[in-house]
Structures are given as C-alpha cells and as structure tokens.
Amino acid sequence: MPTRNVNQPRGHTKRAHPTRLCVDNTMPDKITHWIRPGIRALSAYHVPDPGECIKLDAMENPYTWPEEMVDAWLQRLRGAALNRYPDPAARVLAGRLREAMAVPTGQALMLGNGSDEIIQIIVQTLAGSGRVIMAPEPSFVMYRMIAAFCRMEYVGVPLCEDFGLDLDAMLAAIAEHRPAVIFLAYPNNPTGNLFDADDIGVILDAAPGLVVVDEAYHAFADASFMPRLGEADNLLVMRTVSKMGLAGLRLGLLAGPSAWLDEFDKVRLPYNINVLTQVSADFALENIDVLEAQTTQITRDRETLWQALAAMPGITPFPSRANFILFRVAGDADTVFAALKADGVLIKNLNPAGGSLAACLRVSVGRPEENRTFLQALHSAIA
C-alpha cells in the first residue's frame, strides 16, 4: 500500500517538479557586478601545450634521474602516509633544505607551494591602502600579477639597455613611492643576467620596506645573497628547487629574519606542502650530487649554446647566468618563433611584450641533442 506523509493533507497528491533547463541570460551582468574590474582586466597566466615539440620554453631541467635512483625513490614513497595530513611545518624537509641551501645559522625558513605562493604570501601580508610593490622591468611577471590580485599598486622601473639595474632610476622611484617590498630576481628572468651586487646593497640601504632577492636560478649563477642574510634587517632570500630538476614538486623557500617570517607564516595556508612533495624533495636532496651534476652539465651546455648563437648572423644573444638565453633576432621574431614551432621546437616568444623585449626570444638550455636541433631549426628560420 502506498504511504502518505502524515503532514500532507488528504486528497493531495505530491507532484515532482519538472526538470528545468536553466538558461541565465543575466550571467554577463553578474560577472560584471561580482568580479573585480582589476581581475576582469587581467589575462590568465598562459602555459602553451607543447604537443610533440622539443620543450625549451619553461627553463626546466631536461634530465631525469638514473633508473636506480627512481627505484629507490618509489620505495621511499611506499612509506608515505596518504591517509594523514602532512607535517604542517615540513620539519624533516626544512632541515634538509637548510643544509642544501646553506641557510645561515639563526635565519628562519618558510616553505611554499613554489615561489609563486611565497610571493603571494608576502604581498598579502604587506597589502594596504596606498602601498606599493616595486621591481625592475622586465622581470618575473608574477610580481605584477600578484600585486593586482592583492589590490596593491605595482611600480616597474625600466632596466638599462644592457638589462642592468638603472640605479639612479631605482633610487628615485624608491624615494617617490616608498615601496613596501622590492623584488629583485637574481639572476633576472627573462634577461638571464645578474644585477650588480653593490647596486643591490645600495637599494637595501635606501628601501623603507623589504627587499626580496629572488634566486630561482641560483644553481646556475655562482652568486648569491644567502650568505648576507642578517647583514640588513630588510633582506630576504627566496629560492625554488624547480630549476634543479624538481619543477613537478612545486617547492619554494624563503629565508630571513624570524621577525618577518613569523608574520608571513600567519598567512600561509596549513599543510601547503603535501606529503608526496615532502618525501620526494627530501629524497632528492639526499641525492643532491645527482642534481648538481646535471646543473654542471646544463651550465656547460649554456656556454656552448651561447657561443653558437653569437656566431649566427642576425642573432644577438645576451649574457646569461641562468639556464636559459635571451636573444634578439634581426628579422620578425613572431615569424621566427612560428617557424621554430612548426619545425618541432617550442621556445618562448617575448616579442609581444614590446619595449626592451621587442624582437626577443628566449630558449631554455636542453640536452645537447635538443640544443643542436634548436640551432638547426633557428638557422633555417632566419635563412
């Protein structure tokens, strides 16, 4: 016998609501109303699909691990407790990073899901009405983007023609805008050069707020501000393990005085470094000699690649202390980029950025055979 809800009047039959196709013609108006104009004006960070191309566009380490090291890593992963939250402080990994990165005694350490998250944590913590983020231009695009995310004004100070710091312009901008934080990529991305260390020292003295030296490419640079931590109370050093061959793990670190990092840690989301990253990065740094051998090979191949580019008519490569080379072409850079891609080689086209990057392309240092294929394709593209 059918049952009836006791609260339903006799003689009343409950009818199911018909399925309705919801077509909301007001969606554009809702987007306009609810999404901040500053966000709507942005373009999402675009990562192209490489397809079958040789991938030389993202400054990645092109080498994998030896098979026996992969086997040992997979065995280590068997002990990872996926049913438990990871150590929120990643204490074992932090200790390993302190040793591997030579963090000075007495300096604090905070880990992030890549350096992007660390930049966002810094900016979120410092954000306030009328406050400014400053960086040289051109430089890492995320400084500008995260400033927009956090409703902070971004001031870019143009570099000199040789991509060195324009110290006078930087000091004038510091005096005018009183930035809460200055980001200095060292080496710089996308130009590859190291800024003059004495100039950075002058900026540290002049800056009213923080100066973050972003050493994403430290492994290839043979220069660092890490040993100088503690000399100035506004100096922080940021690094990532991505360029060392661990890009897939998304792990960055920030080192500096605990008075600053304790405040940033309040903004860091809990458990931001997952258990697989913690275990894998600790294992990789335990075998850092393998990573360092790969870095040495890449640095050697960078010089070979630079010499080949310098000898090519119509190509002007810029000096690099990173794992990539920026170069300018005499012809149409967009056409050269498209020809390379059609020939199965994907690099980075910086020509659309304009300004000092007009006619510029950037190539990551790959394996020797990948570099040779790139050079052959470039020769054909400019012929």
Image (cartoon, grey):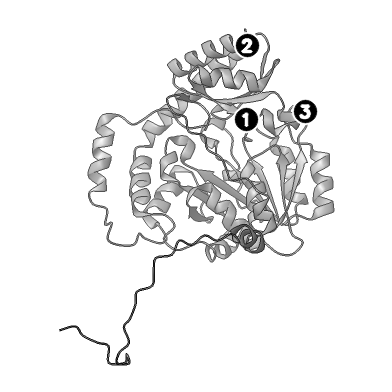
Q: Amino acid at mark 1?
A: Gly
Foreground pick, 228 / 11 = 11
Q: Quadrant of the C terminus?
A: top right
Q: What residue is pinned by disc 2?
A: 382
Residue 292 spot, x, y in % from top left: 42, 31
Q: Earlier in the sequence, mark 1 or mark 3?
A: 3
| Mark 1–mark 3 CB contact (< 8 Å) | no
* Residue 161 numbered mark, or none: 3
Foreground pick, 361 / 218 = 361
Q: Residue furthest front?
A: 11
Tell me if 107 is positioned left or right of 285 in this view: right
Tell me if 62 is positioned left or right of 16 in this view: right
Q: Amino acid at mark 3?
A: Glu
Nearer the viewer's eye, disc 3 or disc 2?
2
In percent of the image, x 50 and y 43: which residue is there? 240
Q: Earlier in the sequence, mark 1 or mark 2?
A: 1
Residue 255 spot, x, y in % from top left: 54, 52
Q: What residue is pinned by disc 1?
A: 192
Foreground pick, 315 / 148 = 148
Nearer the viewer's eye, disc 1 or disc 2?
2
